[in-house]
Every structure is written in structure tokens, then in C-alpha cells.
Image: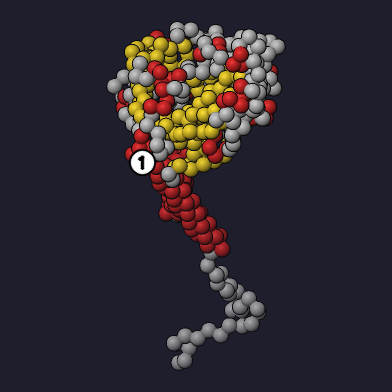
Amino acid sequence: MQLPVGLAAGGGGVFFMAVVAGWYGMPKLISSQIASGLALKKGSDIRQMWSNFSDPIDFRVYVLNLTNPEAVHRGEKPIVQEIGPYFYEEYKQKVKLRDHKEDDTVSYNNKITWLFNQGKSAPGLTGDEMVTMPHPLLLKNGTVDAGRLRVKRGIQNIDDLGRVVAFNGEPKMSSWRGDPCNDLRGTDSTIFPPFRDPKEPIVAFGADLCLSLGANWERKAEYMGVPGNRYTAELPDMKGNPEHHCYCPTEQTCLEKGTLDLSPCAGAPVIATLPHFYLASETYLQTVSGLRPTKENHELFMVFESTTGSPMEARKRLQFNMFLHKINKIDLLANVPYALMPLIWVEEGLALEEKYVSTLRMLFRMQGIMSGVKWTLMAVGMGMAGAGGYLHFKRRKELVVGPAEPKKVVAGHDTTGHPIRLESSHSRY
């Protein structure tokens, strides 16, 4: 009886260990390793990559050239023609780093350098054309940005990794008319915490826009064989969304959907939209000819791997515009039409190379192997327990039924009452 019981007990033990290890032990171990590897500890590989990313990011600039300036002076609708891209290699560094152990944060300034790449630019463009209409950021090429950020390192709590807690020494901004527009929400956009719920928005703070922007889940996606999720974002709707009303220049003057007045942040009358007024109010698109907004070319999106918090592919696209309207005291503007004039739009593009994606792919391969081992051990445990149970009940049945009972003999008669003739070797004599 010991073999069936031992077999069943052993199978149950294997099944239990597979469940505990498969659903708790190994995932807990992997999560611990990921969290430890992503925290911004001094001297760690991730800290070095975060503070000084060695590979350039694609940076494209498109100029929207006004083709009928004289007609516009007479009051006709502006016609623009897109020129570009002007392709730049963008190198990002974080400088003047200082750790603050008391609240597990690190503060820094950004330094961005752009190098023009004529070979990847549109044919015939040399980069010199940009002198007449430069992107404001390019004017600060290679200089240290004055804005100072302070973010969580994630050593004490990995869920806080990269979260912005102060900008220029303040826990809130003062650019906008009130909260929640002045709140610092999300990470610094260069690192994100792991183990995210894929359906939760990804929020990041952009110091260049004085804005925290959220990207919402769109669908599942895949990048170079690694499963992820795709997110898209749009600019605030200060007129239609009460929570965005604090972005309005004044209480009575709110811009239409998909626009953001950057005057409080940039100190200049610049209006931000997505390229070609994509997702913006149709009102603005009707004031200019030559724009053709499409999702493929003009949306702001990110493909994100939630387990490690890794952006695998992203396109940050923004267009900068200025309002055109009559000014009677200036002859040049006395007859111009009302329009939101597009000037320039930029695209900052990220696409992880194979050397980074292979690490993510290895993680998923390990998870697949462990899942296979887990289910195999569970099947073996169930098989052993089932076999032990079968053998145990089979033996028990045999003991209950027992061997066939012999016939009883009573006083020379069998159980049917017939006489029994007995013979021996001596009866014959």
C-alpha cells in the first residue's frame, strides 16, 4: 500500500511546488531583478544610459513655406508648401547631476546637441535654409538648458521611477492660470517604471512645453518580435474639457480643440498644434491651404513594453504656429485675413536598435520557458497523483472483494443435500 500513497503524495508535492514557484516564486524573482536593474543607482548601467544615451535620436524639421505672400497682403487665403525633412542627429545628456538620498531623488539639467545630416535630409537641402526660420530649440544647440528637473530614482519604490517632483526647485509650475494645469505629473519622458497596467495612460512632463501630457492606450502592438502596447496622445482641449480650462489665455478667451498657447511658457505668441492641424478644430484648417493631416504622418504615438517600462518606438510631433490678423495701423497687415499660420513642425523619433531589443526578447523567451516548465511540472504532478490514486483504490477494491469462498460440507452432504461418496486407497480392500 505504500507505493500508491507515496506516488500520490509525491505528485501532489510536485503540483504544489509548480504552482507556488510558477505563479509566485519565479515571477517574484524576475520582478525583483528587473526592479533592481532599473533603479537609478549611482554607477549602474541604467543610470549611465539614462544620463548620457550614446545613440542619437532622429530629429526631423519641416518648414511650411508661404507661397503667396503678396496675395495674403491683399486679403487672400495663405497657401503653404511643406519643405523637408531637415534631418538632425539628436544627442541627449543630463548634466550637473546631484543625488538627494533623503527623498530618493536626483536633480539635473538637460543638454541637447543637434548635428545636421544632409544624407538623410530631403534632396537639395543643405541646412543653411534653416537660418531664416529656425526651430527655437536649435538656437540653443549644445548649450545647457536652464530648467532644472528633480525626479525619483526608484531605489526605495520602483513604482516612482522617473517621476518628476520639482521643476526649477518648485513642486508646481506657475505658467498657467491654475490647477491641474500647473501640476507636475508623470515622468521626465526618458524613463518609466516597470510592471505597468497596459491600459493605464502613460504620462510625461515636457519642460519645453511646461506641460504634462498623457498618452492613452490604443491597441496591442509588436516591435521587432517583442509584444507591447501602442499609445497615442493629443493636445489639451481647453474649450471642451473643463479640466483643461486652466490652459485658456484668459477666462473668456479659450482656443479651439487641439491647440495650446505657449506664450506663458515660451514668452512668445506661439501656438502649438499637432502637424498639419491633425486632431485640431476644423476651424483652423479652413484658414490655410496646403495642409493634409493624416494619422500615419502626423500623430503622436508610442509603442511601449509594460513589464520593463521600455519605450520601443515613438514619434513626438509638434507644429508651431502664429495667428495672422489685421492690424490697421500697420500697412503690411491692414488687409491680411484671419488665419492660424503654420511655421514649422518637428518630429523626434525613437526606434530601439537590435542590441537593446534582444535583451527584451531574451526576457520574454525566459518567461516562455518558465511557463512551459511550470505547466509541465503541473501535468507531471497531476499524472503522478492520478496514478497513485488509481493504484490505491484498485488495491483497496481487491481487499474488499477477497478470493472466492470454498464450498461447505455438512455431515456427508454438500450444500445441495446430495450425499458425498468418500473413497480412499484403503476402501478398495
Does 49 sit left or right of 265 as displayed? left
- Answer left or right for 262 relative to 157: right
Residue 115 visible, this angle = yes
Q: Nearer the viewer, residue 144 or 356?
A: 144
Q: x%, y% of residue 109? A: 38, 14
Measured along the vertical axis of the image, is residue 149 above or below residue 49?
above
Figure quadrant of residue 410: bottom right
Give the position of the N terminus as an image quadrant.
bottom left
Is 398 or 390 nearer to us in this picture? 390
Residue at coordinates 70% horizontally, 11% vertically from top-left? Answer: 252
Residue 58 seen anywhere in this rendered image of the structure = no
Residue 181: % across, % down: 59, 14
The residue at the point 53 percent across, 13 percent down is 268
Name of the residue lying farthest toward the bottom: 429
Residue at image coords 48%, 30%: 62
Q: Residues within 10 Å of mark 1 (few under 14, many from 20)?
A: few
What residue sits right under mark 1 in the picture? 354
Return the x and y of residue 2 as percentages of the image width and height. 43, 52
